[in-house]
Each structure stands twice: as structure tokens, then as C-alpha cells.
Amino acid sequence: MCSRISPSEFLTCQTLYKKIYIRFHIYTNMVIKTREELIKKYIDFFKSKHHKEIPSSSLIPENDPTVLFTTAGMHPLVPYLLGQKHPLGKKLVSVQKCLRTVDIEKVGNETHHTFFEMLGNWSLGDYWKKEAIEWSYEFLTKVLEINKDKLAFSVFKGNDQAKKDVESAERWKLLGVEESRIACLPKEDNWWELGGTSGPCGPDTEMFYWSGNDKIPYKFDSKDKRWVEIWNDVFMQYFKVSEGKYEELKQKNVDTGMGVERTVAVLNDLSDNYKTSIFQPIIKEIEFISGKPYEGNEKPMRIVADHLRASVFILGDSKEIKPANVGGGYILRRLIRRAIRYAKLLNIEENFTKKIAEVIVNNYKDYVELEQNSQFIFKQLNDEENRFSMTLEKGLKKLDEVIKNNDHVINGKDAFLLFQSYGFPIEMTAELAKEKNIQVDVKSFESEFLKHQELSRNSSAVTFKSGLADDSQTTIRLHTATHLLNEALRIVLGNEIKQKGSNITPERLRFDFNFPRKLTEEELKKIQDVVNEKIVQGLKVSREEHSLNEAIKLGAQAEFGMKYPDLVSVYTINDNNDKKKWFSKEICTGPHVKNTNEIGKFKIIKEEGVAAGVRRIKAIVE
């Protein structure tokens, strides 16, 4: 037929055909079934909105030592949320590795996880509610092709400290959302803020998906569990000055979060996250090893799959955390041992953690650190499994004996005995006791624990009172002191010294580095003297932005194993105030003092080993 039409008509026909083909091609490629597809669509979408992609940061946060692990995508961005300029600009997007253990007892149901991936886009003082909400709706309905009738939303209802978020509610309505699908909820539901006494905060608007098989209700009820939260837009418009007191922020930020695991389940019409392609290879391996089907054994299989996935990512991190009795190592040990305990319920007797870990490493090829650190991962899992398997059966028998000899409560001494002699984390003892309607005196256990440990904390969240997240002047002084310490170590001990991690609170700095032996008193004095000499000299501290490759060529130090974006901040401590000479040059997010004479007197208070070939220095400034 086209041969019978004029050239101009032919071109019109051809253009129309191309448009139809492109639209059909796009439509047929919008069906998203896997995590890889979801992540790519999300990143590409926000890149089309002029966002710059940043890499997933370490699971151990650099800028917030109030938590053991990165619990949200915003943790690596704390300095920029507080006003520091980001090298890649004001619009950012990423998928971030996260880990939460505050509700570990819920793992075993269909949706809870300890480790998870969080998609996020950020505005650092750029766009605000209009763009954030419109793009969220566009991504959900156009890119993911979710039926708008299956969506509902919540906004902050307001209180004495902050007004109702009318702007967000109105924005949803302008997009065509019925008022019956918008719920105004209190602070505990629709408000976000950093842990601690102060920091940026604000209302959020959450997006929900109807997961039920029956008719969708006309009115959104947030208490109906069939409405599953899949995305959250946080609007940081306030600064928490103190408890109950908030002020308007000069730089208003947008911080969003979409859980990969939950969203993939939604897109596949699954109410059970463990039936998605993310978990099925792991579940299939557990089925093979145990000889049992998933159906009827869901809880133990979910716990084994979840806990070992989390353990693999902790072990695969550049920080090289190992199972231990304190800090992040304690969380890791608790996860591995809980997985082993539930594997026993599946009648798995042989060593199995390495086999599961191999599947997990293979599933996440986009995280190259897992393959690079695979031998470390496998060895630590196997060693911990061997340690715990030797005492697990004896410990269970001892627990039965303790329960028989106690009247409804296991005292602290017995709980500590199970911990010290049989390797039972207190949470495991409490969980096993609860199954038999027995309580554990956790407070008296903690008292016993304090007698035997220098550093004691409960299994959960915090280790230090505050850190870089609070942006205090003392913390900033200590932060710059770590740069001086880093270079002083190389001067005294040799250029092969590399930073292995750091942690800074207003009380002290902690710096980890590679070295094969204990430092002598003479070496420690030389290191301390070098740092104090540079402080007294009053050296200027400056910040520049460079591409990552250029920064390395310029001689900037980078933390071993750390992932960096293509454009980075480089902090230089100039020698004798001459820009052509420098004492220290490091890739760092900041913040820092402007001159070393602001730091005060530097004093090393402790030097110790923390792992094979890794030493730790703790220091203060006076």
C-alpha cells in the first residue's frame, strides 16, 4: 500500500510506524521481574531527571558511629545533608546496602530481612515536594506500570512542633489520587529524624501497594496489612534543636527510600519475598541440603537464607569484620549462630554455611567485593560453624537443665554461663526460653557481662553517644587529627601503612591500620610528636574537587577497599602554608578545621591489636 502514496505521506506513515514500534518496544520491556531489572530502571529513570549515580557505600557507616551498620541510604550522605557540598552536585541516586537488627525476631515471616538493598534519590537543597512526589508517581505508574487503583499514600498530620503536611497531600490530589486514598497519620508513622538529640528531620509521605487478592477497598486503611509500604519520600525541612523543639532548615533536603526486596515481590504479585528470584536460589540450596520442601518449613528456611545473606555481606565488606563478642562482630556472630540453630531444626547436620554462601556470592555479581573477599567469607563462616557446632548440642542440654531448675525465670548467671561456655548469644537464650514459656533476666545477664568485658553493649543498636553525624566542633577537630595521624604513621612506620577504618566521637578518635606487631613506646611517642608538631605549625587545611583518577595521581590517600564516586573531595593539609607543598592529602567527605592550630594537643591513649595484621590507635585532643 505504501507504494501508492506520495513521498510526504510515506514519511508520515514511516514516522507513525516508528512511534508505534518504539512505544510497543518500551511497553514490552517494562515488565520487571528481577532485582537487576528494578535497580537498572530506577537508576536510569533518575539519571534522566539529571541525578548523578553514587556507588553503594560500606555497610559500616563512616559518618555516623551511633550505629554499628548502615541502616539507610542516607547514612553515607550525612555531611551533605548537613550542608557540605557534594562533589557530584545536588541531585543524587543510588542503591545502598543496608542492615538492621532491631527487629531480628520478626525475621521468619514473609517480608522481614536483616540485610536489604535500598534504592534512593536525593535532593541536597535543590528540588522539593512537587518534583519528588511527581517523579515518584511517574516511576510507579509509568515505569513500573503499577495500576494507580492499587496505590495509596500517607502524609504527616501535624502536631504541636510541626504543621500538617498539606502540600504533599495536595500534590497527590493534583496527580489524580482520590482523597480517600490519602491518610493523614501521626509522627510515629510519618516523621523521620536522625537518632540522637539533634539533627535534620521532617515529615515524610509513604506509598503503599494493595497486595490482597480480593476487591481493593475504596478507603485506605494504614492498619490493614494488605497495604504494603513500598516507597518513602522524606522531606527534611526542620532541624531538631532539642527534644520537642524544631527550627526550619536553611537547606531543605529530599531523601527517599524504596526497598528492593519488597518491591520485587510486589511486581511479581507475591506476598512472600522469599519466593522471588532474589531468594529462590538460596531457598533451593537449603531444600537440597536438608532434603525438605520450603512449604511447611518456611520459618527456619527464611531465617537461614536471610541470616546467611546478611553474614556474607558483612564479611564481604572492606572493613573485614569477623565474628566476635562485641560490636559489629557480635551481630555477625549472632546471625551465623541463629542460622545454624534453625538449620538444626531442618535436620541439617553437616557443615552447610559455605555452600549457601557460594550461592549468595554468585547471585550478587554486581557487588564485586563479595567475589574478591570470597575466601575470607567462606573461612570465617566455616570456622564459626565449627566453633558453635561443637557446643550447640551440649548447650541445648544445659539450657534444658537450667529451665528445670528455675521457676519461670532464667537468672543472669545461668544466662551468662550459656553465653560464655556454650556460645549462646543472650538473644538466642531468650528466644529458646520463650518457646518454653520461660523468661530470662536480661538485666542481671548484662551485669554479669559487664564484669567480664571492657566494652559491653546489648546486641542491638548503639556503641557510642555521637560522632561525625552531630557535626560538633570537637568531632571535627578529631577528624582532622586522624589525617595527621595517618601521615605520621607512614613517616614513623613506613609508606606501606594503609587506613583500615576509623571511628570518631566527641570523646576520642579510633584509627585502624595495617601493621604486623605491637608498636613500641618509642614509636608511639614519635607518632604523637609528629602530629603535635604539625598542629603547632598552624597548617592550612583546604578542600578541592577532582576526578577519582586525578586525585590518586595527585597523591591523595584513599581508604583500602572503599568505593568512591567518579568525582571526589580531596582535603589537603598544606606544609608551611605553601600550596605547592603538603603534609597530608586524602580523599574524604569532611568536615575539617580550617587550620591545624584549631585542633589542640594530640594525645595517644591506647594502642592495641584488633585482627590479624591490623592495629588500632585511640587518641584524644585536649
Image: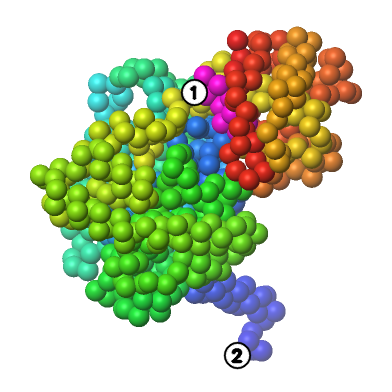
Query: In terms of secondary structure, where does tag 2 sit?
Result: loop
The image position of residue 94, as x and y in percent, is: 55, 49
Identify which residue is drawn at 87% across, 17% down.
Answer: 578
In the rendered picture of this protein, how many numbered marks are placed on residues? 2
Identify which residue is drawn at 31% across, 41% down.
Answer: 416
The image position of residue 492, as x and y in percent, is: 80, 27
Residue 341 can be seen, yes or no: yes
Left or right relative to 111: residue 314: right
Type of amino acid under label 1: Asp
Identify which residue is drawn at 27% across, 71% down.
Answer: 297
Q: Earlier in the sequence, mark 1 or mark 2?
A: 2
Q: Quadrant of the N terminus?
A: bottom right
Q: Nearer the viewer, residue 466 or 22?
A: 466
* Range of magenta residues: 502-511
Type of amino acid under label 2: Met
The quadrant where residue 199 appears: top left
Q: Residues within 10 Å of mark 1 (few under 14, many from 20)?
A: many
- From the viewer's perspective, is residue 208 above or below residue 487? below
The colour scheme is rainbow
Q: Nearer the viewer, residue 321 or 403?
A: 403
Q: Which residue is mark 1?
A: 470
- From the viewer's perspective, is residue 389 above or below residue 160? below
The image position of residue 215, as x and y in percent, is: 18, 65
The image position of residue 331, as x and y in percent, is: 42, 46
